[in-house]
Amino acid sequence: MPRTIPFAVTVRRRSRTGWQRWQGSWWQIMQCGLGAGVAWMLAQALWNQPYPVFACVAVVVCLGVQNNQRLRRVGELGVGVTIGVLLGTGVVALVGRGPLQITAIVAAAMLIARFLDSGILLVNQAALQASFIVAYPPQAGTSGSARWLDAMTGVVVALAIAALLPPDPRRDVRGRAKAYAGQLADLLEDGADAIRGQDAAKAQEVLARARSTSTELEGWSQSVNAGQEVHRLSPLRRSGRGEILQQKKLQAGMDRATRNVRVALRRVATALQYGEQMPDSLAGALDSLAASVRSLGEPAYAGETVPPSVAGLKELAVTLGPRTLGAESLSATVVVAQLRSIVVDLLQAQGVSAAEAHRLLPH
């Protein structure tokens, strides 16, 4: 019977990942709440709107919980709102409301927005605003332009928050880096368990999970790019530029390492599927690699000169010889070769030169 990951372990991992996501998003969430309240009050005060829903919606859509391209999102929403409201108002004035009118206006708004720009938010907002204008009559005592004023009020509030109160991008980048490192370490540990138990089914399951890590890795990359954007635009956040550049290098190294992890796990799964014995020493190497990956980004301990991840990777590197690990079969040798590449990639991502990293490996 294939062994499954214990429920308690799954809950612990999901809780850890959720907590890390929360740490990286709480500031953006607070900004959305604050912006929605401010936009509501301003729309009521400026335009005498009793229920300025579109002002709040505009703020939340513009800001969201992602740091990347916030200013661009604000601009796209503003253009999309303008296109949608103007077209919707014109159609209602000329031919009234109905299913045919909505069909025509949604298609027209999206075509115009798509012609003007490739931004998905711009296109969607143009269609949504046009649909709202056609489908829902305005509130009593308000004009057709009232919703446009609401939405543009929200856009202005979101623009002010995005420009004047940008979140510290390092927090989100750190959270994503730690979450991804934990995810990759989990895969390595579960791969080690599959080797110890000679469990082909579990090895296949771990391989499937390894192949589905692209979304998290891409999210980390987008977070790094967003951090660079914030540091370029905001003078309040330029002090952390060096850390963002280090994270960019680390993310690129983890990307390369992840590809080699997939190759190693695929070889493990194939070998176990055909009954080929894999030495337990490989499982120990995977566990050691997992420990080093999990500690990525942690500072050096008191009295030490290098971070724990670098120290662990260097200790592991000197053991990664086929003879040292008892890798006698082709599959085991392939896994050792992938481990060597992973260690070199991760050491280089943390500032160790390629020459030094290769020198540590047994010849």
Image (tube, helix red, strand yellow):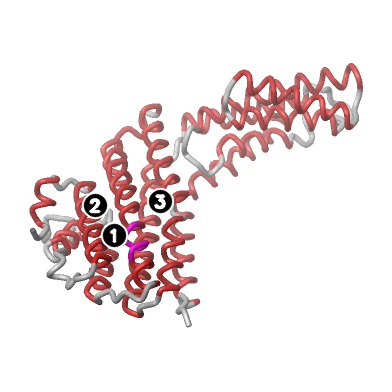
- The CA distance from mark 1 to mark 3 is 14 Å
Image position, residue 149 (x, y; %): 72, 24
Task: Determine crowd level at label 1: few under 14, some 14-19, many 20+ residues with C-alpha closer than 10 A.
Answer: many
Question: Is 103 a magenta residue?
Answer: no
Pointer 1 with pointer 3, Cβ within 8 A: no
Pointer 2 with pointer 1, Cβ within 8 A: yes
Task: Determine crowd level at label 3: few under 14, some 14-19, many 20+ residues with C-alpha closer than 10 A.
Answer: many
When the figure is inspected, residue 194 is found, relative to residue 313, above or below; the finding is below
Q: What residue type is labelled 2?
A: Leu
Q: Residue at x 74, y 30 (%)?
A: 129
In the image, is 117 to the left or to the right of 279?
right
Under circle 2, the secondary element is helix
Q: Which residue is drawn at 91% across and 20% down?
A: 95
Q: Is the magenta stretch mostly helix, strand or loop?
A: helix
- The CA distance from mark 3 to mark 2 is 17 Å
Q: Which residue is drawn at 28% across and 59% down?
A: 293
In the image, is 114 to the left or to the right of 88?
left
| Residue sitting farthest toward the bottom | 1
What residue would you read off at disc 1? Answer: 293
Under circle 3, the secondary element is helix
- Of the image marks 1 and 3, the number of the one nearer the N terminus: 3
In the image, is 257 to the left or to the right of 105?
left
- Rendering quarter of residue 47: top right
What residue would you read off at disc 2? Answer: 346
Q: What residue type is labelled 1?
A: Val
- Which residue occupies the foreground of this view, 147 or 210? 210
Image position, residue 165 (x, y; %): 46, 35
Split into 4 quadrants, where in the image is the C terminus?
Answer: bottom left
- The CA distance from mark 2 to mark 1 is 8 Å
Image position, residue 14 (x, y; %): 48, 65
Residue interval drawn in magenta = 263-267
Q: Can residue 238 be seen in this view?
A: yes
